């Protein structure tokens, strides 16, 4: 009698291998076997200290034989289609980044362009702004921050940490 199971990777219903004892979780497809090995390695790295050390030594030895800059250069030389695709994708990312930067210029028209004075005390005043012709949220609260240099304008009732208008 053939036993069937659902492969954890491809989610297909497949016949179990009768030679394997125990619960088979992956089918024989190459992609599924790679997924099984990745899962085994992830588990082994998490639980086996000796295995982790051996892997680190092997990786270090490989890195000594193939420095990163040489490995990348060789890979690009051997895979010109990768290089061209990467250039196209980078060009798209750059266009998107420029477009987002332009949008910030449109939306953030009230951004703080200069550093505020370092008095640490500011007066917050609501400003009425005509938002009909601008690209901003309609419910945005626009305020003006005014640094207070003259402490006589400061009302200490609004600052529980202040005594006599000082911190």
Image: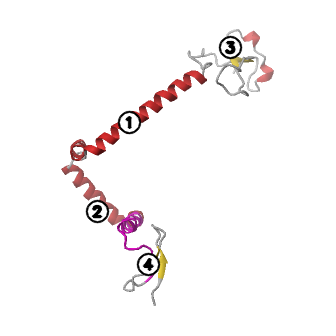
Farthest left residue? 65
Mark 1 or 4, which is nearer the eye? 1
* SS type, badge 1: helix
Look at the image and say whether residue 128 sits in the magenta stretch.
Answer: no
Mark 1 or 3, which is nearer the eye? 1
* SS type, badge 3: strand
Closer to the chain start, of discs 1 and 4, is 4
Residue 146 - label: 3
CA separation, marks 4 and 2? 28 Å
Closer to the chain start, of discs 2 and 3, is 2
Neighbours of disc 4 within 10 Å: few (<14), some (14-19), many (20+)? some
Provide the residue designation for mark 4: 24
Closer to the chain start, of discs 3 and 4, is 4
Neighbours of disc 2 within 10 Å: few (<14), some (14-19), many (20+)? few
Tell me residue 105's x, y (percent).
55, 21
Residue 54 - label: 2
Closer to the chain start, of discs 2 and 1, is 2
């Amino acid at each position: 009698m053939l036993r069937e199971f659902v492969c954890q990777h491809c989610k297909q219903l497949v016949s179990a291998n009768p030679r394997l004892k125990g619960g088979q979780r992956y089918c024989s497809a190459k992609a599924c076997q790679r997924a099984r090995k990745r899962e085994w390695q992830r588990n082994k790295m998490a639980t086996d200290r000796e295995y982790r050390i051996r892997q680190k030594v092997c990786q270090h030895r490989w890195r000594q034989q193939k420095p990163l800059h040489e490995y990348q250069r060789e890979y690009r030389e051997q895979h010109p289609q990768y290089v061209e695709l990467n250039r196209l994708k980078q060009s798209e990312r750059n266009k998107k980044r420029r477009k987002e930067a332009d949008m910030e210029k449109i939306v953030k028209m009230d951004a703080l362009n200069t550093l505020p004075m370092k008095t640490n005390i500011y007066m917050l005043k609501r400003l009425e702004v005509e938002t009909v012709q601008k690209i901003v949220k309609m419910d945005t609260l626009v305020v003006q921050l005014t640094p207070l240099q003259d402490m006589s304008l400061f009302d200490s009732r609004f600052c529980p940490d202040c005594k006599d208008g000082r911190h």
